Amino acid sequence: MSFLKASSVARPSAPSPTPSNASGSGGKRKRPEESTVVYSQPQETGTGSHIYTQLTYTIDFLRQNQRWMTFKEIMEYLNVRADDHTTRQHLTTLFRSNNPQNRISYNPKDNTYRYKPKFDIRNTAQLKGYFQKQKSSQGLSVKDLKDGWANVHEDLKELEAKKEVLVKRNLKDQQARTVWGNDPSLVHKMDPEFANEWHKVQIPPNPDDLRNSLLAAGLKPSSAPRQVVASKPDKKKRKGPRRGGKQTNTHMANILKDFSHMRK
C-alpha cells in the first residue's frame, strides 16, 4: 500500500476575510459614503458653575471700567434676563458678600458696585493720605496699585518730580516698581563748598588699593576676612571622692561586715 504525499493532496482554499471590491463585470465597486453624524453638545448643567462664571465676568467688567455701576448695567452686560430671578438673587448675594476674598465693593446708599483692588488707592490724593496715616515706612508695590489705578505710572512721575514720593525702578525698562512716601520739607540743598570737597575725594578704581589704603590708615576694611577663633574644649571637672553620708542600719552593726578599711 502506497502512502500519498502531503503535497499531492489538494487543500481547499480559505475564504477571503474581506469581500472583493471587484464586481463580476470587472469594474470596482464603490464604497458606500459614510454618513457624518453630528451630535449636539450638552448644554451647561449645574447653576453653581454658571453663577461663578458670571461672577468672574462681572469682576473683569468692573476692573476695566473702574467706576460705580448699577445692578441693571451689570445684568445688561451679562445678558441676564429680567425674569431670571434665581440667577439675579444668587449674583446679588455674591456681590454683597463680606468675604475678604470678594473683589466687589458695594455702596448701600445708592445700590451701586465697583471693583475692589488690594489697596483702595485710585489717585495721588489717596496715595499721600495713605502714607500720612502709615505707622511704618513700608513701600507699596506699584503692580498692586495699578490694579485699581490705571494711570499710576504717569501720576507717580509728577509726585516724584515734586519730591513727594521715593520710587524704585527696574533696571531694564525703568518702570516704577516700589513707591515710598517722602516729606519734601526734609529735603535741603547741600552747600556747594561741601559738595566740591566731597567730590574731590577720589576712590581708587582697584578695590585692592582701597583696602590697602584703609589698612595703612589703621582702619579695618569691610572686605577683611573674618577670623574665626577656635574655641578650646571645656575641660571636664573630675569628680571628687564621694563623702560618706549618714550611716544607717546601726542596729545591725554586729551582724554586717565592716569594709571601711578598704576605702581609698
Image: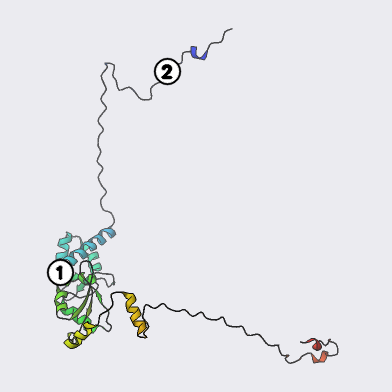
Quadrant of the snapshot with the C terminus:
bottom right
In the image, 205 versus 11, the foreground residue is: 205
Displayed quadrant of residue 72: bottom left
Residue 237 vs residue 138: left or right? Answer: right
Q: Secondary structure at mark 1?
A: strand
Q: Could you tell me residue 60's position as x and y percent?
A: 20, 64
Q: Could you tell me residue 114's position as x and y percent?
A: 18, 70
Query: What mark, if any, has residue 117 been given in the picture?
Result: none
Quadrant of the snapshot with the N terminus:
top right
Instruction: State the CA–CA distance, disc 1 to disc 2.
Output: 84 Å
Q: Could you tell me residue 230's position as x and y percent?
A: 51, 79
Q: Decide if residue 153 is in sight here.
A: yes
Q: Height in image: 46 above or below 230?
A: above
Displayed quadrant of residue 187: bottom left
- The amino acid sitting under disc 2 is Ser
- The amino acid sitting under disc 1 is Met
Residue that numbered label 1 is attached to: 69
Q: Height in image: 156 above or below 83?
A: below
In the image, 62 versus 98, the foreground residue is: 62
Residue that numbered label 2 is attached to: 13
Residue for point 34% across, 79% down: 211
Decide which of tag 1 and tag 2 comes sooner along the chain. 2
Displayed quadrant of residue 227: bottom left
Neighbours of disc 2 within 10 Å: few (<14), some (14-19), many (20+): few
Q: Residue furthest right?
A: 254
